[in-house]
Amino acid sequence: MTVMAERPMTGGTESDSFEDLLRTLDELDVPDGYKAEIIRGNIVVSPWSKGYYLDVMELVCEQLRPYLPAEHRISYGPFLYVFPGSERAYGPDIHVAHRRASRISSTHLDGEALSFVAELTSSSTRDDDMTDKVEVYGRAGVPVYLLLDMQEECATVFSMPSAKGYKSSDTKPFGEKLGIPAPFDCVLDTTDFTAP
């Protein structure tokens, strides 16, 4: 498989069922530095983030950790959350879920167990992060979706999930503070989120 940097690669056909795509995804040998997700009926392979994104992910985790709901864990990294009703499977950059959600032997975690998700955009994932994922996370009832637009250097927090996505959003440029709603009820300082 050849993968091009900063450009997603897709595979799958209209006739593939969601379960078939999940099996294919499980068998896929994804090269180091890439992740695979199921978006709009396709397996999408995209490069991992730029180095400084790690600092941003750690800053988000450090700031939110004291405000986590009881028995919830915040993490970043390659875990696949599935949304069977929407036929999607995402590997969010940052995720918060109850600890029992990960006490399974499957590599497919329940997307509806999430209480918070954050995505850091790249040129290859930005459109999906800003459209498809907003709708799917909202329909699944994820209370808070934080979108860090690394190209435009701004943060948007989505809340009040609904059948069409989210009913509420608030956007601030990097460098300002952004309120993170329930169940966290805290303020996120985005001062150090800009590119070096």
Image (spheres, rainbow, N blue to C red):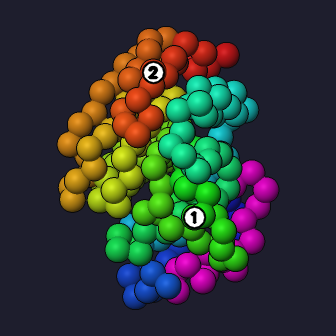
Question: What is the three-letter code of the residue carrying label 2?
Answer: Val
Whether residue 52 is in magenta: the answer is no
Total count of labels: 2
Q: Nearer the viewer, residue 23 or 126?
A: 23
The residue located at (43%, 86%) in the rendering is: 17
Dot 2, how many residues are within 10 Å of its Cα: few (below 14), some (14-19), or many (20+)?
Answer: some
Say above or below: 182 vs 31.
above
Q: Nearer the viewer, residue 123 or 84?
A: 84
- The disc at residue 101 is 1
Question: What is the three-letter code of the residue carrying label 1?
Answer: Ala
Q: Give the quadrant of the C terminus.
A: top right
Say above or below: 57 vs 91.
above
Counting from the top left corner in percent of width and height, residue 171 is at 33, 24
Under circle 1, the secondary element is helix
The residue located at (65%, 40%) in the rendering is: 49
Q: Are the residues at dot 1 and dot 2 in contact (C-beta closer than 8 Å)? A: no
Image side of residue 39 versus residue 6, left or right: left
Residue at image mark 2: 187
Q: Is residue 124 visible?
A: no
Under circle 2, the secondary element is strand
Residue, far front: 70
Counting from the top left corner in percent of width and height, residue 152 is at 44, 24
Image side of residue 187 versus residue 68, left or right: left
Q: Which residues are magenta?
A: 20-37
Please identify the quarter of the rendering in which residue 15 is found. Answer: bottom left
Counting from the top left corner in percent of width and height, residue 41 is at 42, 73
Q: Nearer the viewer, residue 172 or 99?
A: 99
Whether residue 21 is in magenta: the answer is yes
Counting from the top left corner in percent of width and height, residue 188 is at 49, 22
Measure the C-alpha gap from mark 1 to mark 2.
26 Å
